[in-house]
Every structure is written in C-alpha cells, then in structure tokens.
Image (cartoon, rainbow, N blue to C red):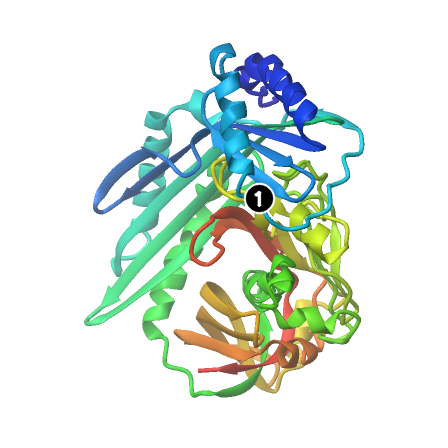
Amino acid sequence: MKLAFSPYLTGVKPLLKTLLNKLNERYPYASILAQDSVAQSLSVSRTGVNVSEIGMLTKRGFVVRVHNGRGFCEYAFNEITENNLEDVLSRIKRAESGTNGNDPIPEDSPCTLFSEAEFEVDPEALGAKELVKRLTALREKALSKSELILDVGARLAWQKASKLFLSKNRDLSQSIIWTNGSLFALAARGEEIKDYYKGFSKLGGMELISEMENDEVLAKVASTVTDLLDSQPIPPGEYECICDPDTTGMIVHEAFGHGVEMDMFVKNRAQAKDFIGKRVASDLVSMHDGAAAANECATYLFDDEGTLACDTLVIDKGILVSGYVDQISANRLGVAPTGNGRRQSYDHKAYTRMTNTFFAPGKDKLSDMISSIEYGFLLENPSSGMEDPKNWGIQCMVNIAREIKDGKLTGRIFSPIVLTGYVPDLLKSISQMSDDFALGGGGFCGKGYKEWVKVSDGGPYVKARIRLG
C-alpha cells in the first residue's frame, strides 16, 4: 500500500503558493518547506510498558527562506491562514534586516515531483495495544531462553512524514515511513553483569516486527548475552581485525562521515578539506553517501532545501574525491549541492548531514578473511563512537571481540573493547573486504550533540589492522 500524502499540506498548498508569489515579487529567490509528521515509540521491559509520541519527530509547520540579493534569511511558523499572510510577510521583512554576507543566489531549475511511500503494515492501523501485546510476547519468549537473563527490553519506533517544497520553479512532494526496533538483553552471574543490543530497521511499516519475533533471532540474543558473562578484558595492542557490517558502519560514520560534511570545510574545521584528490585509504575502499545511494531509513527524494537526492562517491579506490554539502555551503565553496541539506524539523536550521553512508562491498569471502588471520579478532556489536574531524582521530566502543587463532574462531570472547586510531592509518591498512553487505538505519546523528536526523550506515566485513584496548 501507499502512504497517502498529508491531506493537511494538500489543503494549505494554495495558500502557500499565494505566499510564494508575494515573496517572489519582493525577492530574487524564495522557497517554502512544509512538514507534517507523526511518530510514536513503544517499549516493554521489566520496568513496565511505555507508549508515547516522539515529540522531536511529531511536527507540523513551515519555513520560508529568501535571498535578498546579499544573503539568506529564514522564518519558521506553524500556522497559515488567509488572515496571517501579511503578518508572515512582515516578519520575514524584519528578519531580512539582519542579513549580512555575499551569498550567491541559488539555482532554481524546474522540477515537479510527487511520491508516496510504499509499505505493508500500517502501525497506526495495527494499533498500540496490539503492538505492545506482540512486544510482550517476544520479550517473554527471549526471557525463557536462559535463567541467567535478568531482563529483555523490546522497543519499536516509527515515523510517518510528508514534506512539500515550493519555489518559483519547483513543486516537490513526498511521503516517507520508516520503522525501527530493538532488543536489549541483560544477564548476570554472581556479580558479573553483561548487556547486548540488537537493532532492526526498515524503510517501510510495521512488517518489521516479524523479523524481531523470529525464534532464531531471539535465541541468538539470549545466547550472546549469556556468552558475554564469560568474556575477558582484552590485552591492549594492535591486532589484525575483521569488522562486521555494523562495526564497519560505525567506522564509516565516525571516522569519515562527519569529516567530509562540507559545511565544516567552510569553517576550516575538517582536515579532509586539504586531502581532496589524495589517498586516504586502501585502494580496496570506495565510500558512498546519499539519500539516493541505498534504500534505508535515511532515504528520501529531495532534501530540506529542495535539492534532489544524490549518490555521492566520497572515496574512489582509496582516493578522496568529494564531500557532501548543503545548498548554502555549496554556494560558498563553489560546488554543486548534493542533497544533504537537512533539518531536525521545519523550525531548525539546515546543515550538511549524512544520509546513507557506507563502504561499497569487495570480492572476498568472510571464511577466507577469517582463515587469513594468524591471531586477531572479529569485532561485533558497536555501541558508540566519537570523532575529531580537525585531527582525524576516532574512539569507538565495541561490545564483542571474538578471538581468531590460526585462521579459526576459538569461541573466546573479549569485552568491552575500545577501538582507537588515526583515520588514514586505519583505512590504509584495510586488506580485504567481503562481498557481503548490510546497512542499518536504527540510529540518529547529532551535529554537536543536537540537530538530530535519521541516518543509516554499514558496509561489508572489513579486515584491517586496528588498535584495541
């Protein structure tokens, strides 16, 4: 089925066009972004049941952007009627008075687009009561797998969003639906307590819950968290490692993703600015970002500035060829925007943001990669990471390191793991990349611990030399 475009936005579109015509009489460029979205979170755990609206994602409103010949200014508002059009215009005029700079007027090539997302199961039609019932059942099933498990938390989240972008030459409409799920398990033996997290994501509807209910998935969650009770601290050092697709995704996101957001180039806050055209990784590495580069939770047809989605090749066989960029930063850098201008919501500023960010797959088999290691680790289940675009350092947390000895997994587990390094050194050490490939879109990304947007990341299994501690 299709997610119907917002009836509310369809109803106010004639008024928005009237406002746009008035703006075009005053300014050489004007655009309007309209948003109507709703989101919900549901969770079941030992502490109880929670069903709540996700306020950050449940929004309805508008933002006007104009260029007055010198620079841009914006005004956001959440209501439009025939009676308040003049008030909106006057507020934009007042906002314009503070405009400084010498930004070029953006291109506004003609484009008309209307798209409604495809999905199978409507979370609203299924209802919170039924979803909580199914979460409770799968939680109880996972708890029954072992007496060592203290708790299992099961969570779902979903968003339905419609966006409309209007300018003199553009009329763009899209509806999007995504669903996320997670299982969190906690196990204990004596004073030892360990946890494990399994995420799920889909550009689509509540058909995702069927993946979470799979008995093999629940059994693996239970066995992994109990196996972690036998884990040991890892001796610090540099090792041959294989990263699973989730860990690869974290490295892509933290090690390189933020570093090539080109609004950081404008501010001279990213070392990558000085490495365009230079080698930054093994020739096995090609990296992509773009809302059109994959089909995951960060996929869309146009960004919040009306730029059509792209598939940007960031690293081509080890050479840094491009970053990705929003409209205003692109103008200042003299490059084309890449469809990465994203807002947390209509009432937040647009920044250059990641979308679907990943390493392209290679040609190696995972079994051959494991066989090639005399002593090292298979890294799984990343939890968090930090990056430093100015100095290209990373620090990431990984929950599981499975020991490899003489080309075989021994069954020994080390946990927790801190992965650190200088980004080019790590990426240049990559010697194998699998033909397996996976992308996950369960997370959000902040810009300086705020400005949260949906992202997805991943890639193949990657073999590299990595410092662990």
Residue pictured at 44% horizontal, 70% vertical: 397
Residue pictured at 61% horizontal, 87% vertical: 374
Q: Position of residue 99 (x, y in %)?
A: 57, 44
Mark 1 surroundings within 10 Å by alpha-carbon count, few (fewer than 14), some (14 through 19), many (20 or more): some
**Vertically, is 141 above or below 162?**
below
Left or right: 363 in relation to 255 = right
Foreground of the two, 15 or 235: 15
**Vertically, is 418 above or below 127?**
below
Foreground of the two, 317 or 263: 263
Q: Position of residue 423 (x, y in %)?
A: 61, 76
**Could you tell me the amino acid type at mark 1?**
Thr
Left or right: 90 in relation to 167 = left
Quadrant where the C terminus lies?
Answer: bottom left
Residue pictured at 44% horizontal, 41% vertical: 213
Q: Position of residue 236 (x, y in %)?
A: 45, 87
Residue pictured at 48% horizontal, 11% vertical: 83
Reading the image, the residue beneath label 1 is 99
Foreground of the two, 335 or 144: 335
SS label for mark 1: loop
